[in-house]
Amino acid sequence: MPRQPAPHGRTGRPPVTSRTQILTAARRLVDRDGWEKLTIRRLAAELGIGATTLYHHLQNKEDLLVLLLNHYIDQTGRPPLPDDPRERIVAAATAMHDALAAWPWAAEVLTVDGFVGLLDESALWMVEAVVSGARERGCTPAQAVGVFRSIWYYTVGEILVRAHSVGLGADEPARTRGTSFGGLDASRVPHLAAIGDQWADLAARDTYPRGLCALVDGLLADAATA
Amino acid sequence: MPRQPAPHGRTGRPPVTSRTQILTAARRLVDRDGWEKLTIRRLAAELGIGATTLYHHLQNKEDLLVLLLNHYIDQTGRPPLPDDPRERIVAAATAMHDALAAWPWAAEVLTVDGFVGLLDESALWMVEAVVSGARERGCTPAQAVGVFRSIWYYTVGEILVRAHSVGLGADEPARTRGTSFGGLDASRVPHLAAIGDQWADLAARDTYPRGLCALVDGLLADAATA
DNA sequence: ACCTGAACACCGTTCAAGT
DNA sequence: ACCTGAACACCGTTCAAGT
């Protein structure tokens, strides 16, 4: 419901037509200055209004985050879904992953809040795709929900761990020590000691797709034998 | 290296013998008031010292978090590890999971920081157990690292999602609406609509062990066929 | 060495007041 | 209805100063 531009009596600063302007400004701020700079006060400054004014459009900061996440998901394209149920599950999971990986701060929101409550209907196609694939492969409704949840855990975990591992090398090379198991006690942790400095390289590889397929195959096999 | 109690000239407040007292106070504060109340200023008050004094023992807040996490892990018991490699992987992963689940705020630290750099050697037995099990089942070193990472993602994701879903029902029953897919459009998301209100129940179940086994079996099978 | 208060540069949020 | 500044109750961190 767009606002009428007609100023009935007043010609001052146009009102902050609710959510849309706020969300685009928030998105701009995050993209420019980073996720940790998204604050009520800064966002108000970005909009050229007082900080307290924002509270006429937003319940609180959490509200802003949820709104922004849904706004982002709404803009995310929806890939074609394969007919094969197993491939459909993988494609939907990959779409979730890629959407989050492209905007890592979105994953932060997922930790600030429970996840299910903040997805609006435009994001549910991913859930539907996974559940439908699982059902077609013989899962019960309970099993299908379990399949989705396992995939979701794996995906969120990958995003969060990766998001917080990136950039450490840039400003804090001291911590690179932890990432390589160079000087480990070979008698206590022989396999890690053997891997040694290679750990950093191996841990930097993108193993999400590989692990996802293994997970999906494992979940479907488990459901089939139950 | 414990401090001599002998006050050479002064009998004022005993010094904050570095880390140990700080960490026990921090742990007490977190257990009593919750993770979000752990702040430099409050911790100083808990210790009965000035806030700035803490900076003689701590680099910064992140340092405190890392120290506290390692302190917690050090105190965590180490379960017996099965001889069977597959069972060993599952047991080690379950131990990681249970340790984090028992103190959910620890999972928060994992998102604040990359994880590998903050584990000290006393926690590496879990990594070693997973890697050794994978190696015994024929994985290459690279595959074994991949097995660990996939399990880690799944575990961290489960902890984080669960930690942030708990308690929502308590103070915010309004958001329970999101957790049930009651009034969904059956033509657009038929499977979710069919599950409907059952989603909340199904999502509340503990499916970590089930999903973990599926993941491990999937990973080992994948490595075997590569 | 160890500790301090004051200060800086921020937060989210509320409230009474303005148009 | 929409917006405001002032204020409240906090943060992490730095710095010059005290013993």
Image (cartoon, coloured by chain):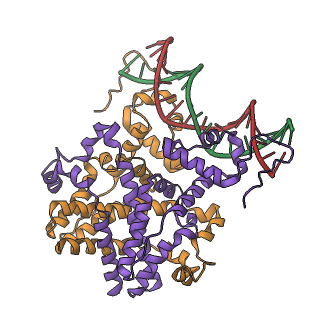
Chain colours: A orange, B purple, C red, D green
Name the outermost residue toward the front. B6
Residue drawn 45% across the image and 31% down it: A54
Left or right position of D1 against A182:
left
Q: Position of residue B34 (x, y in %)?
A: 48, 44
Q: Quadrant of the C terminus of chain B?
A: bottom left
Q: Quadrant of the N terminus of chain B?
A: bottom right
Residue drawn 18% across the image and 62% down it: A132
Closest to the observer, A62 or B64: B64
Q: Position of residue A7 (x, y in %)?
A: 38, 21
The mark total stands at: 0
Do we see residue A117 in this rendering?
Answer: yes
Q: Position of residue A82 (x, y in %)?
A: 21, 69
Left or right position of B214 against C19:
left
Q: Position of residue C15 (x, y in %)?
A: 47, 18
Left or right position of B221 against C18:
left
Residue drawn 47% across the image and 69% down it: B78
Question: Against B77, is B222 above or below?
Answer: below
Query: Quarter of the image holding residue A88?
Result: bottom left
Do we see residue B114 in this rendering?
Answer: no
Query: Quarter of the image holding residue A172?
Result: bottom right
Question: Against B43, is A150 above or below?
Answer: below
Residue drawn 39% across the image and 88% down it: B138
Closest to the observer, B60 or B51: B51
Closest to the observer, B200 or A73: B200
